Image (cartoon, helix red, strand yellow):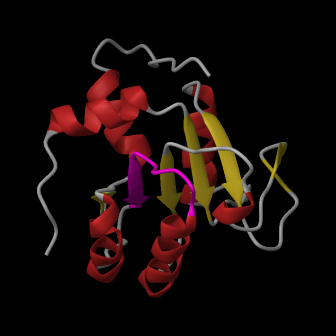
Amino acid sequence: MMEIIRNQDLKNILTQAKTIAVIGAKDKPGQPVNDVGLYLIKAGYRVIPVHPKRQNVWGLETWKTILDIPFPVDIINLFRAPDFCPAHAKEVLQLNYTPLCFWMQLGITCNEAAEILKPRSIQVIQDRCIKIEHQRLFQDTGQLEQHPV
């Protein structure tokens, strides 16, 4: 069962966040993950690509797992099939900090992952595109909201 997220809660998360790990990062033109990653960079977020086989995505150093990232990230943004989400949620539990949010992209829902993260009180967002939500919440003026790193 997906919980209802208020616009103000989404806005707070996107405003507080400075660093976003993109799991499943690929810089292949035309793929949603590429468009979203580039958008987040342009919006001023520090984007951390995560992919087990790639060394560089979007010109950025790429980490194999979120556990390999040597600094805290605010949002864990997933571009992975729902079957992989519980494993990533379990990785989040191993972190020595608590991210603001575990964000599953549009078309991705996994209640099991949400249940895994419940004890840590991590906000879980399912089936929403972070780019679409950012545009909807911040671009009423036509200006891209910049988030200083």
Q: Nearer the viewer, residue 90 or 38?
A: 90
In this rendering, would 81 be left or right of 113?
A: right
- In this rendering, the answer to whether 129 lies above or below 65 is above
Q: Nearer the viewer, residue 77 or 42?
A: 77
> Where the N terminus falls, by quadrant?
bottom left
Q: Please report the residue visible at 33 percent of the width from the left and 23 percent of the height from the top.
A: 138
Extreme-bottom residue of the structure: 83
Coordinates of residue 118 in the picture (x, y in percent) = 27, 67
Query: What secondary structure is the magenta-colored segment mainly?
Result: loop
Quadrant in the rendering for residue 100: top left
Magenta stretch: includes residue 15? no
Extreme-front residue of the structure: 96
Look at the image and give the residue range highlighted in magenta. 95-105
- In this rendering, the answer to whether 63 lies above or below 108 is above
In this rendering, would 136 be left or right of 65?
A: left
In this rendering, would 56 be left or right of 6?
A: right
Would residue 53 be seen by someone viewing this image from the given angle?
Answer: yes
Would residue 136 be seen by someone viewing this image from the given angle?
Answer: no
Q: Please report the residue visible at 13 percent of the width from the left and 42 percent of the height from the top.
A: 6
Q: Please report the residue visible at 65 percent of the width from the left and 62 percent of the height from the top.
A: 66
Magenta stretch: includes residue 97? yes
Q: Nearer the viewer, residue 56 or 19?
A: 19
Coordinates of residue 3 in the picture (x, y in percent) = 13, 62
> Where the C terminus falls, by quadrant?
top right
Q: Please report the residue visible at 48 percent of the width from the left and 47 percent of the height from the top.
A: 75
- In this rendering, the answer to whether 43 lies above or below 27 is above
Coordinates of residue 17 in the picture (x, y in percent) = 46, 33
Coordinates of residue 56 in the picture (x, y in percent) = 86, 54
- In this rendering, the answer to whether 33 lies above or below 44 is below
Quadrant in the rendering for residue 62: bottom right
